[in-house]
Amino acid sequence: MWRCWKFAAHEVTALRGSTHGFHAARLLGFFSGGCLPVLLVAATVLAMTDARPDLGSGHPSAASASSALRHLRREVLAMQGYTPGEQVSDCVKLNTNECPYPPAPGVLTTLNDIGAERLRLYPNPVSQKLRDVAAATFGVSAEQVLAGNGSDDCLTVIFRAFLRAGERVAVPWPTYGLYDTLATLQDVEIVHVDYVRSANDWTLPSHLAQQAAKLLIVANPNNPSATLTPVAELRRLADQHDGIVVIDEAYIDFAPAGSSVLPFLDQHPNLIVLRTFSKSASLAGARLGLLFASAELIAHLMKVKDSYNVNVVSQALGVAALEDRDHHRELVRRVVDERGRLGRLLAERFGGSWPTSHGKFLLVKVGARAGEIYTALKAKGILVRWWNRDVLRDHLRITVGTPAQTDRLLAELSVIVDRS
């Protein structure tokens, strides 16, 4: 039988790109001697080969490959995709707000203990244990929690569930750019309502609720300013707005105690609160987020999420992170302490200004040289965030790192500034 397969492979190869008669005759003559099953397979291979035309240059089908683009939605063709912060190895990363310290020891133990059998099977489709532990941690019921593949996944669920094409979402601006990307994909209008900005603070625009929007989203603390809107003001917004109010609390753990609206979830049926494990739990690579809402809303949002949207590893790591609150508090304390140190040293050595930070970064106004400084730091292996647009063009957003990373940043800044 092996002789049959070897001969078939040779002859099918020869048939490609030739007149088939001679080799077809040899195949038929040979296989009539008892290798008919192999003949059938060879014939199938030949048919598949014929069914796939050469798409080389000059072939009519080459043009059709690009013409397939016309089937894409016009919104996708026209949009600028979301631009995440650069991910570069072997550098000082102060551009994407990851936590600079390792996750809880129990997280690492859990990671090492996940065996092949757990990887072989699908995860729990609704992340039940994670929801149970999150509910106990944050003082809600498990029925009020939905887990996502990062809080970005939770945002996608919200846009899918609430917004029809042509409807409107409103955000204070500038803020997290992914909101715009999701609005474009959902074919909805997004309205930017400018923050009231001063050197030390950005405050919520008073007319945000008057935008005829079905959905309002407020990042609190805001990204990229790290400014904080008081709970009382957010609760008034939820009362005023005849629609859904989403408070994205990705950085809330770095704000003063009592800054979250989550304890008031039951008092505002139109309120949704988002949290992430990326910033204060050192699990950005695990992609894990939580959505909190009324049990009635969660029941319907569950129908919209992807079937197994959180993998088995991330579910287990999230549980381990939530169960070690002492380690979490220590991570937050170290970041907040270093945030204060970074601000003091920047002010002493370079001046500049930034809004009071309640996040894990500073939005520093450096003037017209912002782009130049960003490029010079990058050349030295230090990444910060710069946006070449509107009101952010003269700012750099600097993530709070370790003390050693702060010292390296300040040393390189001194060289760059002295060079001018």
Image (spheres, rainbow, N blue to C red):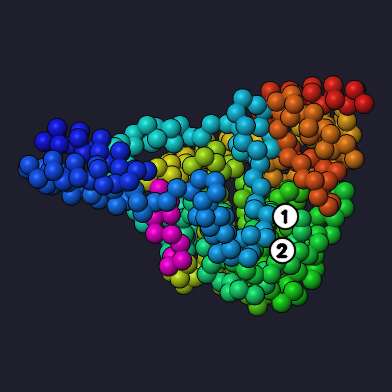
Q: Is residue 13 left or right of residue 284?
A: left
Q: Quadrant of the N terminus?
A: top left
Q: Is residue 119 left or right of residue 159?
A: left
Q: Quadrant of the C terminus?
A: top right
The answer to if 21 sits in the magenta stretch is no
Q: Label 1: which residue? A: 175
**Residue located 87% across and 53% down the image:** 198
Q: From this view, report whether residue 194 is shown above or below residue 36.
A: below
Residue at the far left in the pictured view: 34
**Residue located 79% across and 71% down the image:** 207
Q: Amino acid at mark 1?
A: Thr
Contact? badges 1 and 2 (CB < 8 Å)? yes
Residue 86, quarter of the rendered image: top right
Tell me residue 281's x, y (percent).
54, 41
Tell me residue 156's x, y (percent).
55, 60
Q: Is residue 394 left or right of residue 382?
A: right
Q: Label 2: which residue? A: 171
Range drawn in magenta: 302-311
Nearest the eye: 418 or 363: 418
Q: Amino acid at mark 2?
A: Val
Nearest the eye: 148 or 165: 165
Label 2 neighbour load within 10 Å: few <14, some 14-19, many 20+: many
Element at badge 2?
Answer: strand
**Residue located 51% across and 35% down the image:** 103
Element at badge 1?
Answer: loop
Label 1 neighbour load within 10 Å: few <14, some 14-19, many 20+: many
